[in-house]
Image: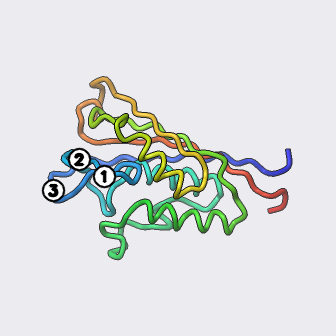
Amino acid sequence: MTGRIRVGQGFDIHPFSDDPERVLMLGGVAFEGERALHGHSDADVIAHAVTDALLGAAGLGDIGSHFPDTDPALAGADSIELLTAAMRDIREAGWTVCNVDCSVVLEAPKLAPKRDAMQRRLTDAVGAPVTVKGKRAEGLGSLGRSEGIACWAVALLEGAESE
């Protein structure tokens, strides 16, 4: 092996919002007409989980330490822009992303019609392949009762030999 390999795991979950003005954003793609998620930023659980996985793998903390939900400047922030900013830090630290894989748990909406668009947006922001899979909670727990959406992400990074 020519370099160091690091793995990071990311997780995010948001409840649905009752605000009719919010738009559901998943993987940087708008799902118009669908119930949006509640959050300080645009509440994109996929972009948040990807960002957390990448930062963790690089040993650079987590999304909350870089982009705190107490920062008024981040209210309504575009999560793909936050991911892009995190990627600058990751690259500056000497890491290259090999890939990221995401599992999104939700009852609705269906992800398949917009999967390619989400994967393209995330891949463009990360600079490496990002895959997105939708999974149902089969009626179990708060996710199964359609109270929100969660995402788990795993990232693989490679860096130079020396730290």
Cα separation, mark 1 vs mark 3, equals: 16 Å
* Secondary structure under the numbered disc 2 in the rendered image: loop
Cα separation, mark 1 vs mark 2, equals: 15 Å
Query: Left or right: where does residue 3 sit relative to residue 155?
Result: right
At x 30%, y 52%, the residue is 30
Residue 86 lies, with reference to residue 72, above or below; the image says above
Q: Quadrant of residue 144?
A: top left
Q: Residue furthest bottom?
A: 73
Seen from the viewer's position, the closer of residues 147 and 108 is 108
Cα separation, mark 3 vs mark 2, equals: 9 Å
Q: Quadrant of the N terminus?
A: top right
Give the residue number, with chain letter if any, for mark 3.
Answer: 19
Give the residue number, with chain letter if any, for mark 2.
Answer: 16
Please identify, in this view, whether the residue under mark 1 or under mark 3 is nearer the observer: 1
At x 42%, y 67%, the residue is 68
At x 31%, y 63%, the residue is 40
Query: Left or right: where does residue 143 sit relative to residue 65?
Result: left
Image spot of residue 42 (x, y percent): 32, 59
Residue 155 lies, with reference to residue 140, above or below; the image says below
Task: Name which of mark 1 and mark 2 comes first in the sequence.
Answer: 2
Indicate the amino acid at tag 1: Ala
Seen from the viewer's position, the closer of residues 130 and 155 is 130
Q: Quadrant of residue 60?
A: bottom right
Image spot of residue 29 (x, y percent): 36, 51
Confirm or deny contact between disc 1 and disc 3 (CB under 8 A): no
Indicate the amino acid at tag 2: Phe
What numbered label is drawn on residue 30? 1
Confirm or deny contact between disc 3 and disc 2 (CB under 8 A): no
Task: Name which of mark 1 and mark 3 comes first in the sequence.
Answer: 3
